[in-house]
Image (cartoon, coloured by chain):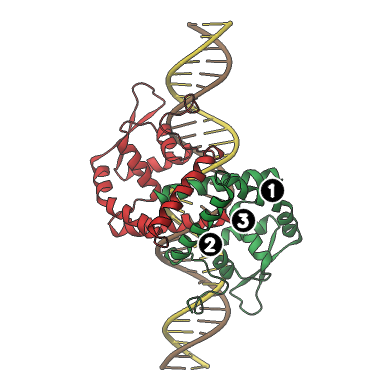
Chain colours: A green, B red, C yellow, D brown
Amino acid sequence: MPGHLVRRFQQVAVAVFQAEVGAAGSDLTPVQFAALAAAQSAPGIDQKTLAGLIAYDRTTITGVVDRLVYKGFLERRASAKDRRAHELHVTAEGDAVLKQIAPAVEAAQTVMLRGLSEDEAGEFLRLLKKAVDAVNDLSRAPMRASRTGEDAGK
Amino acid sequence: MPGHLVRRFQQVAVAVFQAEVGAAGSDLTPVQFAALAAAQSAPGIDQKTLAGLIAYDRTTITGVVDRLVYKGFLERRASAKDRRAHELHVTAEGDAVLKQIAPAVEAAQTVMLRGLSEDEAGEFLRLLKKAVDAVNDLSRAPMRASRTGEDAGK
DNA sequence: AATATTTACTCAGTATGCTGATTATCAGTA
DNA sequence: TACTGATAATCAGCATACTGAGTAAATATT
């Protein structure tokens, strides 16, 4: 029942994240946090590349970005190079909220692994990463280091 | 980033399940499969207890049962003992589909762990179970062995 | 240059998951 | 018996995730 256990752990991980971040005064979801943090580390990134960085489906990211824009944490600008694409830029408010909740995000990761010793947690994360790497291409939204497409498999 | 990795693994696990089960001729989702299998092992179970067995939220299960009933795999009957509750019974079609996709469900679990050796997979599942057990009560839908409520913590 | 293909994004529809409110029923008590 | 609180299920609303289709713009081909 690995599938069931993983689903269960993911369920708890989301709840813990919301609790910790909520206590820090924000209602950012785990997915919104991941998207905002990724956009911060790559200013001007387009949605497709952002999706690849954090393994979102392309259709999911539209809604996530919508909500981050609505909350005032992210800006969509038309790209000069490619008028199909949107450049994403984190606003000052976005920077502020990321800074504000950083300790809560750290705390959440500690809480969700509280059943494991430090050694066990390290081994668990190592195996989890190895397992994920081996099946990365089996979902519609694989992880892509930075660029998508032709150079991804080279 | 344990949260991110777990989310990613869960994402792949669902995709692999759908692919394997789809190839076996069914469109049952992982959640629907879990609910149907649990109902089969406990005929006449009510929705609340079923939710506890597989750690679903009580509001989620309403929709899942709706869809299983619509597909003809599950029956809702009014309980004689408690007219608020519904007894769930797997139909003959439900039994048949569970039997039909059993090999595919097994196969999915092998595929999603293909990056790990047998020893690593065992250790991974051991740590995953341990981690989940330690945080079971941190989500709105904790796992409950069988009955809910007063005797759960005794 | 005109056409065909690919690509970035959006939208419609469906299935989880959650929060919070409501309804009907049960159980305990005045 | 009437009332109070607890409980099983449902419903409304929101946020992921997916499938598949559509749109506009870029790129490749003829």
Badge 2: chain ID: A
Marks 3 and 1: CB-CB under 8 Å?
no
Please tell me which residue lies in front, A103 or A49. Answer: A103
Q: In the displayed structure, would residue A80 be above or below residue A141?
A: below
Please tell me which residue lies in front, A99 or A131. Answer: A131
Q: Give the side of residue B151 with respect to residue A26, left or right.
A: left
Badge 1: chain ID: A
Q: Residues within 10 Å of mark 2 (few under 14, many from 20)?
A: many
Residue drawn 46% across the image and 60% down it: A131
- Amino acid, disc 3: Gln
- Amino acid, disc 2: Tyr
Q: In the displayed structure, would residue D22 be above or below residue A27?
A: below
Q: Are marks 2 and 3 on the same chain?
A: yes
Badge 3: chain ID: A
Please tell me which residue lies in front, B80 or A132. Answer: A132
Residue drawn 37% across the image and 60% down it: B111
* Mark 3 lies on residue: A32
**Residue B130 coordinates in the image, percent (x, y):** 49, 44
Label 3 and label 1: CA atoms lie apart by 11 Å
- Amino acid, disc 1: Ser
Label 2 and label 1: CA atoms lie apart by 22 Å
Q: Quadrant of residue A37?
A: bottom right
